[in-house]
Amino acid sequence: MNMENIKKWKHVMKLDPDKKISAENLEKIVRSGSDALMVSGTQNVTRRNVEKILGMIKKYDIPKVLEPPHPDCIVDGFDYVFVPCVINSDDAMWIVGKHKEWVEKYDIDWETVVPEAYIVLNPDSMVGKVTKARANIGQKGVVAYAVCAERFFNFPIIYIEYSGKYGDPEIVRAVHKNLEKALLFYGGGINSREKAVEMKKYADVIVVGNAAYEDIDRAVETIVR
Amino acid sequence: MNMENIKKWKHVMKLDPDKKISAENLEKIVRSGSDALMVSGTQNVTRRNVEKILGMIKKYDIPKVLEPPHPDCIVDGFDYVFVPCVINSDDAMWIVGKHKEWVEKYDIDWETVVPEAYIVLNPDSMVGKVTKARANIGQKGVVAYAVCAERFFNFPIIYIEYSGKYGDPEIVRAVHKNLEKALLFYGGGINSREKAVEMKKYADVIVVGNAAYEDIDRAVETIVR
């Protein structure tokens, strides 16, 4: 695992294998100045649609990340495989169960693997429901999970995920203040430059997903350096 | 966290705060040549009985480890606090829940903390029942949890725990073969020199607990270098 390049990132665009994107919009995303493309989704992510989107992006000289929701959709050809652990899940399956299955079934290229501790804070989102995330834990609870992820489990990335909803910048600020070395990623509801600027104050990296499918020109404006 | 000294250990004696030990037997344990004393239990472990046993051992010049089953029994005065995560538990509480509570409630001296990934393989033991451990997972399953603990979660110690029952040396051997840097601890049913020698072939450190309460002279014979 090599974190050196990732440490320079400020902005990541997320592409959902379950959604359609035109070649024209993809071109706009790649040219936007975002630091990486992350292929990621919660539902209907298969080897087939991951390969399809990889086919569309592989010609571009930009770091490509796969963030698989389960081990059976992992394909070769990505620079990194960011493997999420939903650390505030109530279901062991999403903390370590799928990971164990993955190790048991596949021959893993650990050099490309980057473990991520997700803290999922929107209980109404698909990822919140699927992973049974304990979302109503207050700022102190979120900080405790983040510190635990960094200090006890040694995660190089802590990811605050509001999935589809703009989150509480105070929580992101508090987490950032309590981390010593892990990178803090923030995702959820960033669909304007103003929100991007606000969350970028506290997060090391902001991730923009839905906006790319809803209004490509506003999505491109979220790149803040 | 400083692992340098721990890497030299071969044998650890476990003392249960919920059990009585005489000063004479304690003296035999300390003089036995074991590398460390670990204060650890599953039931009825309180600040009060942890402090009591610490009071008995503090005069001895031997590394002292506290391995707390919950955060409310952690007291100052130990060289290390080995914090277990039962990675094959079916209950998120034993993987990350208690750890999050600990971070939330206490001001932690991280320098003394050593994270341990427990793989609990005796489903009939108290620890197996309390933590809802998935014990019947076969050799491949145990190896997968161990690799996951080492490579994904970065645990410096993987602990195979048969708690009260002598385990399968083939499983311990397979785990050892698949680890690259983590130390492998083995505990469970070591009550003779023969068993100690056998498990020590594969585990970096063997832990002897019950034997110290059942037959002190045989317990002392388990020290294999």
Image: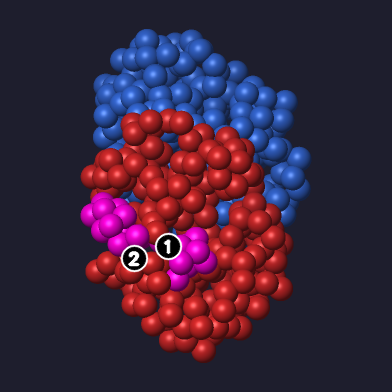
Chain colours: A red, B blue
For label 2, the SS is loop
Q: Is residue B82 left or right of residue A57?
A: left
Q: Position of residue A94 (x, y in %)?
A: 60, 46
Q: Residue at x 34, y 15 (%)?
A: B51
Q: Please report contact status of discs 2 and 1: CB closer than 8 Å, yes or no.
A: yes
- Residue A219: percent from the left, percent from the top? 40, 67
Please state which amino acid type lies under the numbered disc 2.
Answer: Thr
Q: Residue at x 39, y 59 (%)?
A: A191
Q: Is residue B1 above or below residue B82?
A: below
Q: Is residue A205 visible?
A: no
- Give the quadrant of the N terminus of chain B: top left
CA distance separating discs 2 and 1: 8 Å
Vertically, is B83 above or below B23? below
Q: Give the image location of residue A6, x and y in percent.
A: 36, 69
Q: Is residue A215 magenta?
A: yes
Residue designated by label 2: A222
Residue named by callout 1: A208
